[in-house]
Amino acid sequence: MADSTRSPLTAADVMTTRPRTCSAHSTVLEASVLFQDVNCGAVPVIDAGRPIGILTDRDVALAVADNPDLGNRPVAEFMSKDVISIAPDAFLEEVAALFGQHGVHRLLVVDAAGLLQGIIAWSDLAPHVSDASFGRMVGEVDERP
């Protein structure tokens, strides 16, 4: 039987804490090594602890053909600058809604001072939401270009 006194889960409950990060001046090769070392598909780009972008393995894959010197180029040239973030105390319903609303696969979790606290991939929600809710959210995310 479910415990009705249990508090709803928040972003802080499901996020990956202290994700590996890089700066805008880091090379794409340095960021790619992070993808491999920590088995992730995204690296938040920070300046003084505040997120200014995110570089994904997809960003790198799409840039390879047009940039033979990609590994030596700065992350700033290829990162997504429109970072979608959420507060650590946001409930999972709000997290799911942001994924669908913005069509992203990851959200950065930032505190009131704007400092990076963690990252949430949409797949991190799967164990915590209903199959129908998760399916709806994935459908909304995948509909985006």
Image: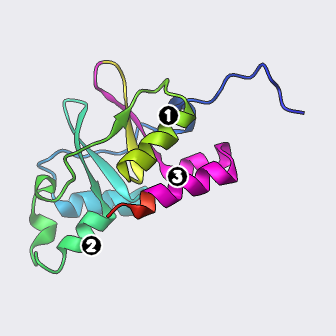
- Looking at the image, tell me whether mark 3 or mark 2 is earlier in sequence order: 2
User: In terms of secondary structure, where does tag 3 sit?
Assistant: helix
Identify which amino acid the numbered label 3 is placed on.
Met
Identify which amino acid the numbered label 2 is placed on.
Ala
| Residue 120 is a magenta residue | yes
Residue 31: x %, y % from top left: 26, 57
Which residue is label 2 attached to? 61
* Placement of the C terminus among the 4 image quadrants: bottom left
- Give the numbered dot on residue 49: none
User: In terms of secondary structure, where does tag 1 sit?
Assistant: helix
Contact flag, marks 3 and 2 (Cβ < 8 Å): no
| Residue 78 is a magenta residue | no
- Looking at the image, tell me whether mark 1 or mark 3 is earlier in sequence order: 1
Contact flag, marks 1 and 3 (Cβ < 8 Å): no
Q: Residues within 10 Å of mark 3 (few under 14, many from 20)?
A: many
Residue 47: x %, y % from top left: 18, 35
Contact flag, marks 2 and 1 (Cβ < 8 Å): no
Tell me the magenta residue range: 113-140
Q: Main secondary structure of the magenta part?
A: helix
- Give the numbered dot on residue 137: 3
- Asked if residue 82 is positioned above or below residue 65 in the image, the reply reads above
Give 19 or 135, whichever is nearer the viewer: 135
Residue 37: x %, y % from top left: 40, 59
- Residue at x 15%, y 58% (from the top left corner): 27
Which residue is label 1 attached to? 94
Instruction: State the image quarter where residue 58 is shown.
Output: bottom left
Residue at mark 2 to residue at mark 1: CA–CA distance: 30 Å
